[in-house]
Every structure is written in C-alpha cells, then in structure tokens.
Image: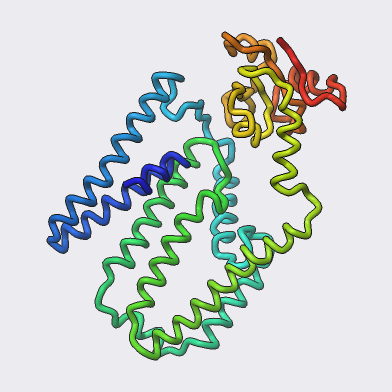
Amino acid sequence: MLAALFMFLMRYIGLIGAGIVGLLGFYYLFKKQWRNMVICWFAGSIPLVLAGLYLLKNYADTGLMTGMERVPSIETPAEFLYMLYEGIMGEMNIFSTDSNIFMQESLIFVLLSVFIFIRWKHIKSLFQIQQYHIPFLFLFTGMVYFIVIVYMRWSAYFDPLGFRLLAPTTLMVWLFLVGWIAQVKEEAWRRWRSTLIVILGAACLFNIGYKSFTSLQDATPTYQETISEVEEMYNNLPEDSIVAFENIHARYVRPDLQYIKVHFRPYFAEDETYKHFMNRITPNHAQGVYFAVPTFKEYRFHQSFVELMENAEAREDFIKVE
C-alpha cells in the first residue's frame, strides 16, 4: 500500500502500482483465497483514494488536476513512432539505455550467450511448466503500463519515450522471463540460469560499473562541490524571495525561497512574455523577485526573456527585477 502511494508521489504514472496490487487480488480470487484477496483490494484502494484527493487538491489550487498545464504532443505521427522505436531499441540494449551505441554488440552478446548454454531440449522445457499465472501477471502488468504510458505520451507532451518512461515495462518483462524460466527442471534450469547470470551480469557491469567508473574519471564537479557552489550562490538571497530559472538543487538547499516556473515551449501552450510573468506572480510577503542567470535553450522562451538574459552581466548570478 505504501509502496504504491510512494510510486504515485514520485510520478503520477506510479499509480499503476495500486493497479498491480489489485491484479494480485484477482489472482487470489481465482485461487479462492478470500482473505488475501480482500487484503490486496483494500491495499490497492487506499492509494487510489489518496491519489484522488491529491489530484482534487491540485485542481482546487491551480484549476488543473495535475497541477500544471498539459499541451498536445508536438511530434508528427512518424516522429512519434520513430521516438517509440528508438525507446524500445534502447530498452533491448543491455549495454546502454541509448539505441545508438552498442546496439549490435548487445544483440551479438545475447545471441552468443544463448547459443553457448542453450540447446533445443532446453527451449522445449519452457513449454512443460505447470504454473503460468504469476509470470503472465508480470507480463500483463508490463503491457498495461506500456499501453497507458504510450497513449498518455501520444495525447500530451512530456518526457521523451526513453528509459525513464519505458523501464517499468522492461522490468516486468524480465520478471516474466525469470518467473517462467525458474520453473523448469534440473539441467534445463542450470543452463537457463547460467544464461541469465551472464546477460544480466553484463547489463549490471556496463550500466552501473562502467558508468560509475567513467563518472569518477570525469572532470565535472562532484555532488558535494555542486552543493557547496549552490549554497554560496544562494546564500545572500533574502528569505521568502521569489526565484525563477533556479538551480534544481536550490529547492532543497534553500527551501525558504519561492520557486516559480516561467512558461516555456513545448511544456506549456505558449511561451509567456516577461510582462505576463510579472503580472502572474503574486509576491505577497516576498522580499524580492530574482532571475537566476541561466544557460537555457533560447528557442523555448519568449524573446523578452532572451534579451533580458543577454543584457545581464556575466559576473551576475541573479537579476533582481522587483
């Protein structure tokens, strides 16, 4: 119950966690395990109710259920399908989350792993198992999530269809495969287990070990160095000031400030002007309105903001506008 609720609080699509618990309740229904069925349905219903109250609170405060404006997808059908294709290929790539690197090497490695360990009799053993319910519950959950997230992304613009959105489906597919393979007997299990260890071990080595190693060799600032820089930069801002274009770490380094987003494309219907932004904010008890001097994608913001930033002196960290 708490896991499903926390998934929702991290991302709205995380509400599918409550659905998974509910599906498990149907499994217990078919098994006629009434107590477990009721527990699952109760545990799945509570996050749904709390999520509904959260969205209603958003609507009461902002007039929008999700708390921000949702705009239609900007891609053409062909562009959307190509983005989806690249996202799926990236999920099939065990060496990276990018479909443009190591893709051929990844495919060759998987095929070699299967060729080395698996014979035809081991493949036939996969169709001799007795219990399909749990593995296919994982697969069904993954497919439901995939259909929902693709439809949502087709209907509205937000993050690209990359690993951040598609990884839950990939996890469910792997759990389906592992749950299915784990039921084969004796020698077949040892063979399939070796194949899984090699493939998943290589995936962990490249996606965690290799990336961790390269990040240590990188000259970019460490987390502690970044936090120290943000603390120094924001230290002199008065409490309760309004800040736009803030550093993402400032939100927890200086939680006493008010952070406001400037509307920009394509996440909002239009890129607002400087005048519109100043009319929209309500300083109330704010000690001032500041723009952090950022490096942003100029084509997303209105020209009035681009000109304002271009006129800022390079040595300035903030522009005080009120």
Quadrant (top left, top right, bottom left, bottom right) of the C terminus: top right
Q: Position of residue 255 (x, y in %)?
A: 59, 28
Nearer to me, 148 or 1: 1
Q: Position of residue 120 (x, y in %)?
A: 43, 89
Position of residue 139 relative to residue 42, above or below, is below
How many numbered discs?
A: 0
Q: Which residue corresponds to the image point at 62% horizontal and 70% vertical from the top-left?
A: 205
- For residue 287, what is the image quadrant? top right
Position of residue 218 relative to residue 206, above or below, is above
Q: Position of residue 208 (x, y in %)?
A: 62, 63
Q: Which residue corresponds to the image point at 59% horizontal and 73% vertical from the top-left?
A: 202
Indicate left or right for 285 with 210 as reference: left
Q: Position of residue 35 (x, y in %)?
A: 14, 55
The furthest residue to the right: 314
Position of residue 234 relative to residue 277, above or below, is below
Indicate left or right for 303 with 54 as reference: right
Nearer to me, 172 or 1: 1
Q: Which residue corresponds to the image point at 55% horizontal and 64% vertical from the top-left?
A: 92
* Residue 260 shows in the view: no
Q: Which residue corresponds to the image point at 16% horizontal and 63% vertical from the top-left?
A: 31
